[in-house]
Image: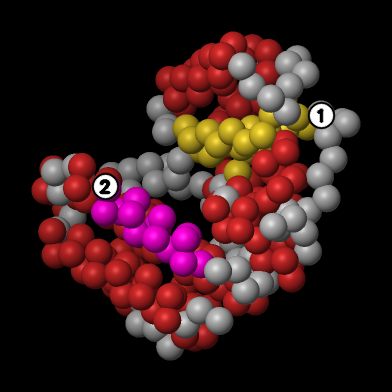
Amino acid sequence: MKTKKITQLLKKNTYLTSLKNNQKVKLILNIGSIPRGDFIEGWSDIDLLIVVESINLQLFKTIYEYQNFLEKKSKIKIGIEIILTDHLQKMTKGKKWAVSSLKILKQFHPNNRQNFKRGILYQNNKFKLTMPPKKFFENLDLKEYLISAKSAIVKILGTYNIKDNKKYILRKLIKNSLLVMQTKLLVDSGELTDNFDLVLRKYKNKYSFDINVIQKSFKKRFLWKTISNKEISLLEIEENWNFFQLLVNNTTNTAK
């Protein structure tokens, strides 16, 4: 499904209307590749962020129905992050909170302002949030983030049969490596780089780090829809797993 049709699907349906009419819902935001303009069919997911003042079982049900509807219509995995307004406020005031929710906080970074505007599916006109400046992101302690990132990959490798799920696992390794690099650059400079080809180049130049393994695998994203599991070798999985581990160690060792 093309980006234009996906955007129309996200914006025009009864489930979104129901969420808009719920006074507890303050913001519904499409985040990631669609507002960035680099959505790739077969490679990219659809990610939504929903900010609520409070939540009950009925609201959970409506959100789940919205997610289920979108997945059935688009045939694309839909990820939804739900966050309470008071939690979001705390994230902007304390760096400990920020590290635990960096994926969400990145969406409100000043460099992401245009993507944020393009991604708004609904915003309550009374909902206002003062987000921190770029300097807030500098020098965050990444230890907790890196432990979480590595644990997520270890869980995947321990849960799935690697031979039968090479395509899924390789994609997770690539995406998690890119996010680690993006996050490291963010906390060292305060700048958010949302172009991942540029993330690779910046990380290589700034930290003199060999990125050949992931760069080669990342290029496959344009053919991801047609690539079969058989076309991905166990050697490529192993190389990307080793790269990811080296990356996490390098990121830890070069922390300020």
Q: Nearer the viewer, residue 168 or 159?
A: 159
The segment highlighted magenta reads: 142-155
Q: Main secondary structure of the magenta part?
A: helix
| Disc 1 residue type (three-letter) | Asn
Quick check: 137 left or right of 196?
right
In terms of sequence position, does the residue under pointer 2 or pointer 1 come before the other? 1
| Residue 143 forms part of the magenta stretch | yes
Residue 239: which quarter of the image? bottom left
| Disc 2 residue type (three-letter) | Ile
Residue at (68% x, 13% y) in the render: 18
Is 1 above or below relative to 87?
Answer: above
Whether residue 194 is visible: yes
Badge 2 vs badge 1, beta-carbon distance below 8 Å: no
Residue topped by disc 1: 124
Q: How far across and down, in percent of the image, does residue 102 sit?
A: 58, 55
Give SS at disc 2: helix
| Residue 247 forms part of the magenta stretch | no
- Mark 1 burial class by Cα count in 10 Å: few <14, some 14-19, many 20+: some
Is 35 above or below relative to 194?
Answer: above
Whether residue 121 is visible: no
- Mark 2 burial class by Cα count in 10 Å: few <14, some 14-19, many 20+: some
Q: How far across and down, in percent of the image, does residue 41 sit?
A: 43, 42
Residue topped by disc 2: 156
Give SS at disc 1: loop
Residue at (60% x, 77% y) in the render: 188
Name the quarter where the C terminus is drawn: bottom right
Quick check: 253 left or right of 164?
right
Q: Alpha carbon of mark 2 to alpha carbon of mark 1: how far? A: 37 Å
Q: How far across and down, in percent of the image, does residue 231 sit?
A: 16, 53
Q: How far across and down, in percent of the image, does residue 27 sit?
A: 72, 33
